[in-house]
Image: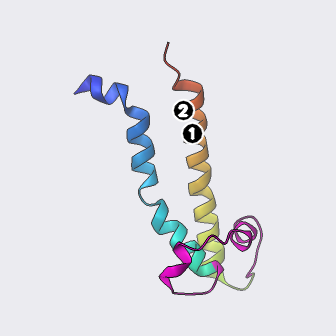
Amino acid sequence: MIDFLKNNIWLILFVAWGLPLTYYRSKFRKIVYQTDSWIINIKPVFIKEIRGLFGNLYPENKEYKRFRNFYLIYLIVYLILFLCYLYFGKTS
């Protein structure tokens, strides 16, 4: 069991951290595109989503700003996890 964890720790970390990603992305897209439709999850519209992530589309909407900041931090941690994998994940 220890060997399994040791050999697959990066996979386990990525799966564990990535599980809530679909929920968070769906919620963020629904806020950005101002819809409750589930179809927004499968539409390939990214421009407004990127602007909403790095900009401030709705300055008066506190829920948008709070969730945008949370989602941005979540994605930064995902990026850090990936960079750690690239740096430390190399086996000799």
Expressed as whole percent of the image width and height from the top left, the position of residue 59 reads: 75, 81
* Residue denoted by label 1: 82
> Number of callouts in the render?
2
Q: Is residue 92 above or below residue 34?
A: above
Question: 10 Å neighbourhood of mark 2: few (<14), some, or many (≥20)?
Answer: some
| Amino acid type of the residue that numbered disc 1 sits on in the rendered structure | Phe
Residue at (57%, 33%) from the top-left corner? Answer: 84
Left or right: 15 as drawn, with respect to 70: left
Q: Is residue 13 above or below residue 61?
A: above
Q: Which residues are magenta?
A: 32-58
Question: 10 Å neighbourhood of mark 1: few (<14), some, or many (≥20)?
Answer: some
Classify residue 79 by image quadrant. top right
Instruction: Name the outermost residue toward the left.
Output: 1
Asked if disc 1 and disc 2 are in contact, CB closer than 8 Å, the reply is yes
Q: Quadrant of the N terminus?
A: top left
Residue at (52%, 73%) from the top-left corner? Answer: 41
Q: CA distance from mark 1 to mark 2?
A: 5 Å
Residue at (48%, 60%) from the top-left corner? Answer: 21
- Magenta stretch contains residue 45: yes
Expressed as whole percent of the image width and height from the top left, the position of residue 46 reads: 69, 68
Res 10 label: none
Residue at (77%, 69%) from the top-left corner? Answer: 55
| Closer to the camera in the image, 24 or 47 | 47
Left or right: 20 as drawn, with respect to 39: left
| Amino acid type of the residue that numbered disc 2 sits on in the rendered structure | Tyr
Instruction: Name the outermost residue toward the top.
Output: 92
* Residue denoted by label 2: 85
SS at circle 2: helix
SS at circle 1: helix
Q: Is residue 72 above or below residue 56?
A: above
